[in-house]
Image (cartoon, helix red, strand yellow):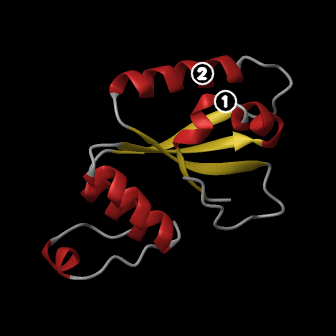
Amino acid sequence: MKLKLDFIANSSSAAYIMSFKTDDEISDFEDFIECLDRNPEYDNEGVRIWQTMESKKELYEYATERPYDWASKAMAARPVNMEQEAFDESLKAINNGHTIILVAVDYNACEEFASSKYYSDMLAEIW
């Protein structure tokens, strides 16, 4: 599923929420990133992983910038670091045993990233 949620015009990269079911899929994705990062045409770092989340607690604390405690469990999440729709999709994936990985992709690498098999693993585009 692909959801474009917002766009920042001055940014030099796009950010995506990726969902992977197995450690082998994550390892293959990391190998792909290393390959992209070796391309001298890409500014900055090509593709960067900046957050990996395997549990509801990790997702909640990243998205809301609050601890996941007894009070948090009783209230609906109000994410500040991602849109509610992206949070809901990420939570659904985690509940189905997936690992969520947030990645930033330099614009110079976006075309190659978008044409890769990993693009189909994307839950949402953050910016």
Figure quadrant of residue 26: top left
**Amino acid at dot 1:** Ser
Q: Which residue is mark 1?
A: 116
Instruction: Name the residue at the right extreme.
Output: 41
Answer yes or no: is residue 53 visible: yes
Disc 2: which residue:
32
Q: Report helix, strand or loop for mark 1.
A: loop
Q: Position of residue 98 (x, y in %)?
A: 33, 43
Location of residue 37 in the rendering, given as x and y in whole percent from the top left corner: 69, 23
Please report the residue visible at 72 percent of the width from the left and 17 percent of the height from the top. Answer: 38
Residue 88 vertical position relative to residue 38 in the rendered view, above or below: below
Distance Cα–Cα, label 1 vs label 2: 9 Å
Sequence-wise first label, 1 or 2: 2
Are the residues at dot 1 and dot 2 in contact (C-beta closer than 8 Å)? yes
Q: In this orientation, does residue 81 appear?
A: no
Left or right: residue 122 versus residue 4 is left
The image quadrant of residue 44 is top right
Q: Residue furthest left?
A: 70
Tell me residue 11's x, y (percent). Answer: 78, 56
Instruction: Give the left or right position of residue 125, taking residue 107 as reference.
Output: left
